[in-house]
């Protein structure tokens, strides 16, 4: 796992992308898209987070082990959300 | 085998003296001993509460204490035992001592964090102790809302803060183990040469770092709700008590595996050594640990079958709970298969390991009863549940903890425990344990609910049996306390490797020097290989046959 | 083994710098996993109550100042850039620019906290602190609106606490940098604290749209 130096150019590129996405998320929020507001906002946030994780946090250039750690974190978060929500979302079924 | 050198050897205990050399140590072995002291203290405190409970339950009517006192007693018994003994017990004491030794490292990856974790544990402990002294807490160790957020007038806040803080010591321990096992294995110590103790501690650490933060934030929200009186969990204020149960059990069910996985690791070591055989299906046992860690996170809803949880979610949780029995059964079968046609020596540690297999099997099988949603509705919150989890936690974790302490006692202290007394108390503990908790299965099945201080007279015979068993169990755990202390001064001085074992931890002197090994060991043999070829030359050690007592 | 002990910055229990660096990075990632789960519990509560009480949440969110939230988002993203550049200059051994970037990162972090403090103060003036004289006269059930603010304060408060800790870490790193502790071979503390800083930024990346922009299309 030798060290990889990310070039300044990439940092500035990612930074610009993050700024554009921030403007975009604010702009989209002013439109009334119904439930899609939340979906678009979350998608943009996920995209921004991925850019930060992959480039600013160097995961793109890191070992498989780091990938596994990052993946495990989000996987367990998904377990927490999915199984808890499986309860709430399936409650109304009984009445049907 | 007599010691060859006459002058006292420098090892981690006699290297430095004085309180400061202990309180500021960064040596994982010394920190393990610090933890041993704290954890033992809490074990006996929790035990004292258990004695009070069993005394009250000797008679059907509430005569020893009032209902409110009883509520506090069982809550504090649970809180102390779960958060301050069972969860840190094996990892923080035996794990701390053995993980670096077993993988051939000089210390854990973050020695100062390790010391910090002990201090954090104690700060949390002080908050909890203060809560106990100033009146205690009466919510049950599960802190169910809205009772805990709105109605209880006991010290919920203080206890919550104590548990919140102590959680971070658990996180730090887990984090340290994971990084250590990944980055600090000795040359040649590949993943599949690791002792199963290490595999199970790795799996445990995963649960510690993934689960503990969730209970931390849950307790924090509970505390904030109690202070601000804004509903997150109280339905009267718009909140949802079931959310609390989801978040709480997301950690607290896997926490059961934090207690039992390290115990399984200990048992694997004991079985392999005293059967003098490689563990049957080593890889299956190793992966079973990982499978338990992952599946353990998918089953928490089986604690909530009688809450307003959706029956469809209940079905999923019920199914997944059955699935977690598979890796557990793999382990039990493989240990048994290891014992088959092996050369068994019935030393004290093995007695505890055999006790573990039997009692854990009963605990696990009754767990399947409870995972079946239909049956659970009948036995939910009865003594059946109490008996079930005591078979897993006491019959499982405590047995393995005791077995491990005996097995590694010569490594830790450089002294041997008295074998006769040890066998005697192992027997006493086994008998006392079964007499205490087996009647509770029957009581529960007959419908005696848990957490009541009085009961109908027809339950008295079984309750008296249980109380009698508890007093036998109590004596059983006092004996080791006495002879362990005694042995530190008067015990026989064993050889460096009294068991003739092949784990790396035995390939250094007992007690080990501060940096564990004179030179970094190079591993060329498989785990539990009881006929290694050129190992002795590599490590510059005497033949193993010689060192056997 | 004895030789390696003289290497600058190498702790006694590691074999070489590579092993130490790997352990440090991995340790920080393991810690960040615990952070994901810690905030995860809060997000779970948010998801549940937002889907249960959409009107109240939307109306409560509309009262937050999204302009300040957006400004703070920009501040944090810029600070992430300066942090990334600090790591870059530590790798290339440029001490002067490393220090500049660390100072800039800290200034931006402090700016974020000042803006946040200003926002909190407005909420205090408007009686929007849950449990302490909370008042609500606009659309939405006050009880549910109060729950939104409870979650808002829990989430942003814990996030702000992380920022404060981050500033502390940056102060230590800055001091180490000024004392010439880092070399081109030993600079993993900069990198590892960078991971933490970026993570705190990511949390805000989610908090901003979820808390501030929820009701933005209905009103202002």
Image (tube, coloured by chain):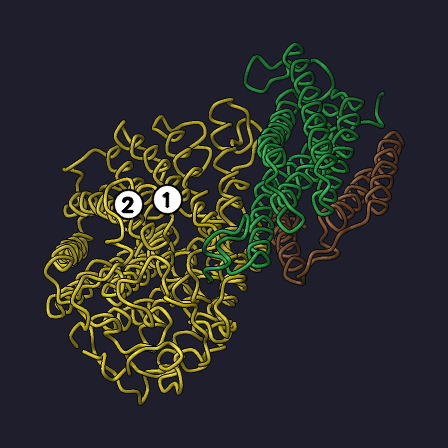
Chain ID for green: C
The quarter in which the C terminus of chain B is drawn is: bottom left
Left-right relation of B121 to B509: right
List x then y, in percent, for residue B432.
17, 61
Q: Earlier in the sequence, mark 1 or mark 2?
A: 2
**The N terminus of chain B lies in which quarter of the figure?**
bottom left
Q: Are marks 1 and 2 in contact (CB under 8 Å)?
A: yes
| Chain B colour as displayed | yellow
Check disc 1 and report the residue beneath it: B118
Nearer to the camera, B352 or C202: C202
Q: Which residue is mark 2?
A: B38
Residue situated in front as seen by the camera: B485 or B107: B107
**Furthest residue toward bottom:** B341
Task: Give how far across and how far down residue C94 sits, in percent.
Answer: 73, 41
The answer for which chain carries disc 2 is B
Percent coordinates x, y for residue C27 in the rendering: 55, 51
Kind of element beneath mark 1 = helix
Q: Give the chain ID for the brown colour.
A: A
């Amino acid at each position: 796992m030798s060290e990889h130096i990310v070039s300044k150019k990439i940092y500035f590129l990612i930074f610009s992308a993050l700024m554009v996405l921030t403007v975009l998320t604010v702009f989209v929020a002013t439109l009334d898209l119904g439930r899609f507001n939340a979906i678009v906002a979350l998608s943009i946030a996920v995209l921004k987070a991925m850019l930060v994780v992959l480039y600013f946090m160097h995961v793109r250039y890191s070992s498989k082990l780091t990938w596994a750690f990052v993946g495990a974190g989000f996987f367990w978060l998904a377990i927490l959300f999915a199984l808890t929500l499986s309860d709430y979302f399936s409650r109304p079924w009984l009445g049907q | 085998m007599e010691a060859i050198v006459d002058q006292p050897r420098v090892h981690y205990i006699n290297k430095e003296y004085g309180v400061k050399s202990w309180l500021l140590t960064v040596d994982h072995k010394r920190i393990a001993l610090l933890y041993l002291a704290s954890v033992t203290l809490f074990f006996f405190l929790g035990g004292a509460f258990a004695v009070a409970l069993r005394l009250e339950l000797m008679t059907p009517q509430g005569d020893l204490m009032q209902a409110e006192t009883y509520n506090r007693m069982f809550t504090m018994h649970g809180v102390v035992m779960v958060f301050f003994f069972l969860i840190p017990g094996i990892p923080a004491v035996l794990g701390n001592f053995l993980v670096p030794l077993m993988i051939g490292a000089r210390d854990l990856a973050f020695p100062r964090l390790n010391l910090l974790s002990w201090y954090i544990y104690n700060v949390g402990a002080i908050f909890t102790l203060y809560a106990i002294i100033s009146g205690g807490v009466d919510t049950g160790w599960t802190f169910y809302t809205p009772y805990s957020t709105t109605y209880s007038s006991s010290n919920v806040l203080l206890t919550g803060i104590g548990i919140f803080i102590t959680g971070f010591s658990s996180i730090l321990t887990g984090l340290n183990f994971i990084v250590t096992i990944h980055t600090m294995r000795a040359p040649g110590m590949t993943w599949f040469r690791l002792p199963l103790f290490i595999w199970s501690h790795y799996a445990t650490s995963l649960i510690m770092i993934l689960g503990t933060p969730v209970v931390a934030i849950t307790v924090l929200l509970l505390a904030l709700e109690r202070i601000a009186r804004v509903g997150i969990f109280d339905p009267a204020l718009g909140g949802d008590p079931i959310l609390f149960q989801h978040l709480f059990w997301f950690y607290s069910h896997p926490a059961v595996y934090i207690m039992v996985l390290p115990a399984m690791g200990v048992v694997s070591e004991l079985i392999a050594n005293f059967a003098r055989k490689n563990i049957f299906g080593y890889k299956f046992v190793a992966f079973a640990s990982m499978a338990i860690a992952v599946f353990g996170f998918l089953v928490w809803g089986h604690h909530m079958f009688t809450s307003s949880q959706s029956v469809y979610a209940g079905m999923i949780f019920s199914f997944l709970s059955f699935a977690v029995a598979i890796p557990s059964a793999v382990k039990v079968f493989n240990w048994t298969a290891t014992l088959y046609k092996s050369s068994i020596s019935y030393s004290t540690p093995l007695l505890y390991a055999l006790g573990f297999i039997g009692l854990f099997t009963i605990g696990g099988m009754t767990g399947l009863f409870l995972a079946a949603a239909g049956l659970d509705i009948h036995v939910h919150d009865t003594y059946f549940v109490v008996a079930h989890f005591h078979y897993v936690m006491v019959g499982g974790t405590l047995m393995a903890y005791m077995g491990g302490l005996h097995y590694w006692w010569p490594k830790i202290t450089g002294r041997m425990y008295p074998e006769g007394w040890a066998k005697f108390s192992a027997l006493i503990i086994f008998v006392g344990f079964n007499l205490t908790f087996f009647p509770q299965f029957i009581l529960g099945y007959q419908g005696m609910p848990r957490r009541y201080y009085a009961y109908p007279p027809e339950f008295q015979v079984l309750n008296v049996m249980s109380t009698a068993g508890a007093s036998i169990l109590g004596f059983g755990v006092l004996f080791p306390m006495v002879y362990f202390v005694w042995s530190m001064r008067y015990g026989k001085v064993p050889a460096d490797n009294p068991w003739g074992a092949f784990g790396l931890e035995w390939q250094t002197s007992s007690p080990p020097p501060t940096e564990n090994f004179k030179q970094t060991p190079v591993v060329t043999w498989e785990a539990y290989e009881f006929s290694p070829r050129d190992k002795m030359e590599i490590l510059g050690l005497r033949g193993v046959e010689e060192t056997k007592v | 083994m004895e030789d390696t002990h003289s290497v600058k910055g190498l702790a006694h229990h590691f074999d070489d710098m590579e092993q130490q660096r790997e352990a440090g990075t991995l340790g920080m990632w393991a810690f960040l996993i615990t952070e994901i789960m810690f905030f995860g519990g809060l997000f779970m509560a948010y998801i549940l109550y937002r889907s249960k009480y959409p009107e109240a949440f939307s109306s409560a969110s509309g009262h937050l100042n999204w302009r300040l939230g957006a400004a703070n988002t920009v501040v944090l993203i810029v600070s992430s850039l300066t942090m990334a550049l600090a790591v870059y200059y530590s790798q290339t051994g440029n001490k002067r620019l490393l220090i500049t970037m660390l100072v800039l990162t800290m200034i931006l972090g402090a700016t974020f906290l000042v803006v946040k403090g200003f926002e909190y103060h407005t909420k205090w003036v408007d009686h929007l602190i849950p449990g302490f004289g909370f008042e609500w006269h606009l659309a939405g059930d006050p009880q549910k609106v109060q729950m939104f603010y409870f979650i808002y304060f829990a989430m942003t408060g814990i996030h702000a606490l992380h920022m404060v800790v981050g500033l502390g870490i940056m102060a230590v790193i800055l001091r180490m940098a000024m004392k010439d502790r880092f070399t081109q071979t030993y600079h993993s503390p900069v990198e590892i604290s960078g991971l933490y800083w970026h993570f705190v930024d990511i949390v805000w990346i989610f908090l901003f749209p979820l808390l501030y922009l929820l009701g933005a299309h209905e009103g202002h």
